[in-house]
């Protein structure tokens, strides 16, 4: 069954916590919501102690009143199950539900998410509340979306308590069936860790030294699955009682601890909480990659931005406000990348508690707040963009994300360097494509790749044969595969592939890795790329180009003259291998060549990272027309050429330029395009191909 949020136009609103305010404020809140153009509100996220003030006694009167107020004003509701934090009475009665650290410390009650997700006691109480909420509000016409719990894994993503240990052993039994299979998979003959039965196994708590890396990897898999199991238990109750209503839980952009692809499979619509740092001038570049996951998690389907800040947050060491116009830019960036809703944390700024300095739509000055004025303008604009809803982002480049590989790569104490988290490489590669104007989707292993020309794999430490076969088929059909260093190293059990890296990727890439040569902190290396020196950092590799052309060689050091970057034709396509982490300028040059050879339209090479980041052009395609979004974060006006079919939706009727911190949204025919007439700070375009046939240097 396809379940969608029944809402006319783009969702606009945010988290509302009426329980923090006296009743006389509620009427004023609803009046101002209408004035700001709010049409969608999240309620009851942290309301369990008020909804069930003592065990078995529910008090829904205040929430009934709030939902009726919103409904009478024409405002739809995203209703939370309120299971994000247990009440104090539950903790007092069952302190065993509190989570335990790897060092054996039981965390205390006093903040949120004070529970172990494997606790059968917590689950029983949470499901009881969920059922009560569903039975009371499931048929209310205001309720359009179920919001299960809140930001899973934000504060507690792993637990090492006895309940987790029991749950972990059950998970292992289900996966391996026999203790012999587990011993083989874990390689327990190393360091005398052989097990005779499952009951002897504990979570990988703090030990005398390095812990079995496969045990740790399985614990990562288990912990994500355990939280997913808790989530799906609530989902099952909601679908039993309210089968027509869609269900979601809010993601936290790209969270290392949880496999969001599995979570997306269990929900109806993806929602995200996005908090780019106003103090970081490049935070919007990383935000674009986060949004690539939100749409990629559901095969390109639109999603909802369920939380963002109207200005400053309250939880960074230094909380810089958003300058005028930045909130609007951030909001339109999310929409450009597939969001059908722009929501905030929160509606009214808190008077007390840890988030009293967190910005809100309605600031502490009420209607006079800058945030209220800016959000109200945005709300009026969004009301005219209903046609955008349901359209999908157009991208010719995809990047692979695989949580198994990411977890395996993060194992401490067992790798050549611990400076290789997947997200670091992914963001570096994405920044290069972003600066060239290429939109990227973030996809899972096994995803349909037929609409893409280029597939990026910044790191794929763990590779299984099925994925290697998919990559070969993609290249054979004309696609371009680009693989980064330290890929194809281990199998699903974190065992080294026979013959070494890149393991099952060897036939596709035509290279063999002899040794990994990490670079110590504070040092850098160099390669010659297109005759020019380009920096490398963090990792290099001694590779042999057995059946591949050499594109770049190392310059200086122990690897001087050896292959650094290679390419191999495979069927109608090609496969590139980067044996080092390239500095940003070199990565941009190389990515420009790769996009050109693959036939992906791009902008000229930027003169600097700042110039490449300044302007973003993203296209969404609907059934009858396309929508182009131009976002200008630079200091200069950006000229644009509009096709004759264009209708300007945002940006003025005579939009020939986009001003600094300006936005242009244009509806046009599929066959037409909005073109940036000039690229501020663009460098001379790339002209000479990099990949020239050369022989390998022998040792």
Image: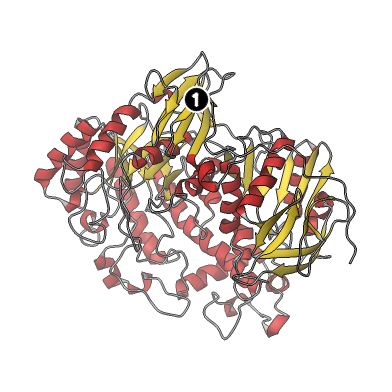
**Quadrant hosting residue 361:** top left
The picture quadrant where one finds residue 89 is: bottom left
Residue 441 in sight in this render? no
**Residue 61, position in %: x, y?**
17, 46
Does residue 654 sit above or below 437 in this rendering? Answer: above
Q: Quadrant of the C terminus?
A: bottom right
Residue 513 drawn at (x, y percent) = 80, 63
Residue at (40% x, 52% y) in the render? 277
Q: Which one is nearer the viewer's eye here, 212 or 585?
A: 585
How many labels were placed on the picture? 1
Q: Residues within 10 Å of mark 1 (few under 14, many from 20)?
A: some
Along the viewing direction, whichever of 413 and 303 lies nearer the viewer: 413
Of residues 243 and 78, the one nearer the viewer is 78
Residue at image x 53%, y 21%? 623
Relative to 263, say whether 495 is above or below. below
Q: Dot 1 lies on which element?
A: strand
Looking at the rendering, which quadrant does residue 665 occupy? top left
Let me know if residue 24 appears in the view.
yes
- Name the residue beneath numbered marker 1: 640
- Left or right: 50 with respect to 11? left
């Amino acid at each position: 069954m396809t379940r969608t949020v029944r809402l006319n136009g783009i969702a606009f609103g945010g988290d509302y916590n009426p329980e923090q305010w006296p009743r006389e404020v509620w009427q004023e809140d609803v009046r101002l919501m209408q004035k700001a153009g709010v049409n969608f509100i999240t309620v009851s996220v942290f309301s369990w102690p008020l909804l069930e003030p003592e065990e078995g006694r529910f008090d829904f009167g205040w929430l009934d009143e709030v939902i009726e107020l919103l409904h009478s004003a024409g405002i739809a509701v995203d209703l939370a199950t309120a299971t994000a934090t247990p009440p104090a009475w539950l903790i007092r009665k069952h302190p065993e539900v509190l989570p335990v650290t790897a060092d054996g410390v039981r965390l205390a009650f006093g903040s949120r998410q004070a529970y172990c997700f494997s606790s059968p006691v917590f689950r029983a109480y949470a499901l009881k509340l969920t059922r009560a909420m569903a039975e009371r509000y499931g048929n209310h016409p205001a309720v359009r979306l179920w919001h299960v719990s809140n930001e899973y894994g934000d504060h507690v993503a792993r637990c090492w308590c006895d309940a987790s240990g029991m749950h972990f052993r059950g998970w292992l039994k289900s996966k391996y069936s026999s203790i012999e299979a587990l011993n083989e998979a874990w390689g327990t003959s190393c360091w005398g860790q052989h097990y005779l039965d499952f009951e002897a196994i504990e979570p990988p708590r703090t030990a005398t030294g390095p812990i079995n890396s496969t045990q740790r990897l399985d614990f990562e898999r288990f912990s994500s699955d355990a939280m997913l199991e808790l989530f799906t238990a609530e989902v099952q109750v909601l679908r039993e009682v309210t089968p027509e209503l869609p269900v979601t839980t809010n993601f936290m952009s790209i969270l290392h601890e949880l496999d969001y692809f599995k979570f997306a499979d269990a929900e109806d619509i993806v929602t995200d909480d996005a908090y780019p740092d106003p103090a970081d001038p490049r935070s919007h570049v990383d935000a674009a990659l986060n949004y690539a996951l939100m749409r990629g998690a559901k095969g390109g389907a639109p999603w909802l931005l369920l939380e963002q800040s109207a200005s400053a947050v309250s939880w960074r060491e230094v909380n810089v406000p958003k300058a005028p116009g930045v909130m609007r830019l951030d909001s339109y960036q999310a929409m450009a990348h597939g969001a059908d809703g722009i929501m905030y944390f929160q509606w009214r700024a808190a008077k007390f508690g840890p988030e009293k300095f967190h910005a809100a739509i309605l600031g502490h000055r009420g209607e006079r707040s800058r945030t209220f004025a800016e959000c109200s303008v945005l709300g009026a604009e969004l009301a005219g963009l209903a046609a955008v809803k349901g359209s999908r982002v157009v991208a010719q480049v995809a990047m692979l994300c695989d949580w198994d590989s990411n977890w395996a790569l993060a194992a401490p104490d067992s790798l050549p360097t611990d400076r290789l988290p997947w997200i670091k490489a992914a963001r570096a590669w994405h920044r290069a494509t972003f600066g060239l104007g290429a939109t990227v989707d973030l996809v899972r292993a096994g995803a349909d790749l037929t609409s893409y020309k280029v597939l990026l794999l910044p790191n794929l430490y763990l590779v299984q044969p099925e994925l290697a076969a998919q990559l070969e088929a993609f290249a054979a059909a004309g696609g371009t595969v680009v693989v980064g260093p330290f890929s194809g190293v281990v199998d699903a059990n974190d065992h080294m592939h026979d013959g070494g890296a890149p393991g099952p990727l060897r036939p596709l890439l035509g290279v063999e890795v002899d040794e990994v040569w990490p670079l110590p902190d504070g040092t850098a290396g160099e390669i010659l790329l297109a005759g020019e020196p380009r920096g490398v950092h963090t990792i290099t590799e001694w590779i042999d180009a057995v059946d591949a052309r050499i594109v770049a060689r190392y310059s200086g050091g122990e690897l001087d003259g050896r292959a650094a970057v290679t390419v191999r034709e495979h069927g109608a396509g090609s496969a590139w291998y980067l044996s080092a982490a390239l500095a940003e300028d070199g990565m941009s040059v190389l990515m420009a060549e790769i996009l050109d050879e693959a036939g992906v339209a791009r902008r000229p090479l930027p003169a600097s990272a700042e110039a490449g980041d300044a302007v973003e052009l993203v296209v969404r395609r609907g059934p009858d027309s396309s929508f182009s979004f131009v976002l200008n974060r630079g200091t200069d006006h950006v000229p644009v050429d509009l096709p004759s079919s264009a209708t300007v939706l945002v940006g003025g009727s005579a939009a020939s330029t986009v001003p600094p911190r300006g936005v242009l949204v244009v509806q046009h025919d599929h066959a037409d395009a909005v073109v940036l007439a000039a690229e501020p700070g663009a460098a001379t375009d790339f002209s000479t191909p990099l990949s020239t046939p050369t022989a390998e240097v022998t040792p």
